[in-house]
Image (cartoon, rainbow, N blue to C red):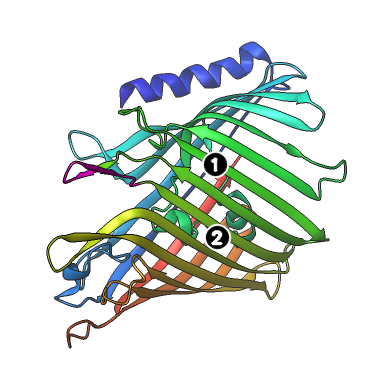
Amino acid sequence: MKQYFLVCTLIVCSTGLFGQSNGKISGYMFGDYFYNIFRDNNIDSLGNVILPGKKDFNGFQFRRIYFTYDYKISETFDTRFRIEADQLANTSNGKIGVALKDAYLKWKNIFDGSDIILGLQPQPAFEISEAIWGFRSLEKTILDLRGIVPSRDLGISLKGMFDNSGNINYWVMIGNNSGNSPEIDKYKRFYGHLYFKPLTNFYVTVYGDLKIRPSLKVNSVTLNNNDITTALFAGYSEKDIFSVGVESFLQIRENGFFEQGATSLIYQTKNALGISAFGSYNFSSMIGAVVRFDHFDPNIDSDFKGDSRNFYILSLVFKPEAAVSIMPNLLYETYESTNGNNYDASVTGRITFYYSFL
């Protein structure tokens, strides 16, 4: 942990050395007091549960702390360095861990209207949908939440506009597909993203990626086992008034599961499906409300039951200052029944706090 504090100290000092006009420090924090109101004793049999922990488990937590340093090298080059702390990233002694989140160099206008970004950086999948959603402090967007696409990747991307108005934009990237961890294999991920603004305040994105995975060897036959992910998003936002959005994805894994045939295993394509709809409204500059519904099915094949779930978020938003939010909220998740077994919903109440600094 000490090395990260040393890095932060060097960054703070560097703002004085290089000049405040070229460097900027910023960050934000959010966490909660949470209480698990209800849990089903058999819920673990479903796997991949959003709302972990046992009934009556409660406490205070920091879910995310960001510390960011942006530095403008010149009119041509920008850099970003960001570290992240959260309670899930524990150190060897069990304390809250700190990890590298962003570390990249941006070469601006390498040709008209386009930038190249090299390093550890956001990938294209949900940057727009997360911005319209606007409440990362309550929860991740569905692609991130369900682990369909990592929030970061180490690689190189090209990002820009097809027209001078910025109404048609693109983003392509090649990355390790290792998140913010070091690369451990030869397989890569290829991302593509189109972003449209057909009307003022109306946003549409089309996303796709190919994740190369190791092949399967079955009876001396080589089978592809790659992931192909596609996603669509449409949203509308009036700044400081309201926003609405719908996002959906389909992830196809070649030969992703098998069934027992008459004489051998029959490999099938695995299709995972998700859809998310949300809305928020500000009654005044201080009071607002948020609602969201997600449906997720990791395998839509009719032979697979008991693996889909519905997830709901209901929240009030109190903003005593523009950079401070206090949000009492309820997380409610239901589970598909299987083999005659019904699972009770998971319910967690929280008071979430968020604040940012420049």
| Percent coordinates x, y for residue 35 in the rendering | 29, 70
Q: Amino acid at mark 2?
A: Phe
Helix, strand or loop at label 1? It is: strand
Nearer the viewer's eye, disc 2 or disc 1?
A: 1
Residue at 37%, 32% in the rendered image: 187
Asked whether residue 123 appears in the rendered view, the answer is no
Magenta part of the chain:
217-225
Using the rendered view, name the quadrant where residue 270 is placed. Answer: bottom left
- Residue 347 sits in quarter: bottom left
Q: Is residue 130 left or right of residue 186?
A: right
Distance of mark 2 from mark 1, alpha carbons?
A: 25 Å
Say whether residue 222 is magenta: yes
Quarter in which the C terminus is drawn: top right
Question: Dot 2: what SS?
Answer: loop
Residue 163 placed where, x, y %? 85, 42
What x and y, as percent, mark residue 78? Answer: 67, 23
Residue hosting label 2? 135
The residue under label 1 is which amino acid type? Tyr
Q: Along the line of sight, which residue is nearer the eye, 78 or 315?
A: 78
Sooner in the amino-acid sequence: mark 2 or mark 1: 2
| Image height of 131 relative to 334, above or below | above
Neighbour tally class for label 2: few under 14, some 14-19, many 20 plus, Cα within 10 Å: some
